[in-house]
Image (tube, rainbow, N blue to C red):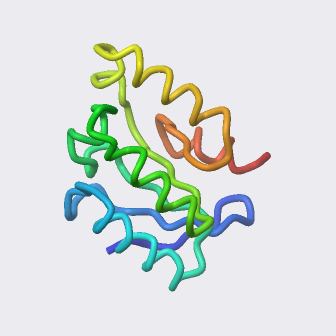
Amino acid sequence: MSTLQTVHDVPVLLCPSEGETIHGEREALDLIGDAGYQGARWVVVPVGRLDESFFRLETRVAGDIVQKFANYRLGLVVLGDVSRHTDGSSALRDFVRECNRGQQMWFVSDAEELGERLKG
């Protein structure tokens, strides 16, 4: 069960580590609906909840999911270590770097880093 928390005055929906794997838009829309119902502005998904296809950019899964969140004006955070995925893909490393420069999607290593990002 996802829980709503306020981090630096920002409502954040935190998804648990256990739960349905997020394969694509259908699961993303379920999260978006839950976040909207609870009044969240950001949704935090542990890296382990994302299907492997998310990290292979050629599948377009990541782009489709990010676009859904953008359409609903919600931010998406991937929480955890993604180095296993980025080590073998310069395109994914570039994607992570670009996302972290923006205000739509972030990749953060832990809750402390998330708190720092939400301060500003």
- Specify the quadrant of the image occupied by residue 22: bottom left
| Relative vertical location of residue 7 with respect to residue 119 in this rendering, above or below | below
- Specify the quadrant of the image occupied by residue 18: bottom left
In the image, 108 versus 98, the foreground residue is: 98
Q: How many marks?
A: 0
Instruction: Please provide percent x and percent y for residue 115.
Output: 64, 48
Q: Is residue 78 left or right of residue 39?
A: left
Q: Farthest residue toward the right? A: 120
| Relative vertical location of residue 38 with respect to residue 15 in this rendering, above or below | below
Instruction: Please provide percent x and percent y for residue 54.
Output: 30, 42
Q: Residue at x 45, y 71 (%)?
A: 32
> Which quarter shows the N terminus?
bottom left
Q: Is residue 43 left or right of residue 29?
A: right
Q: Is residue 63 left or right of residue 75?
A: left
Instruction: Please provide percent x and percent y for residue 86.
Output: 36, 21
In the image, 68 versus 33, the foreground residue is: 68
Q: Residue at x 57, y 59 (%)?
A: 70
Q: Residue at x 36, y 30 (%)?
A: 82
Q: Residue at x 51, y 54 (%)?
A: 76
Q: Farthest residue toward the bottom? A: 37
Instruction: Please provide percent x and percent y for residue 33.
Output: 44, 79
Q: Is residue 77 left or right of residue 80?
A: right
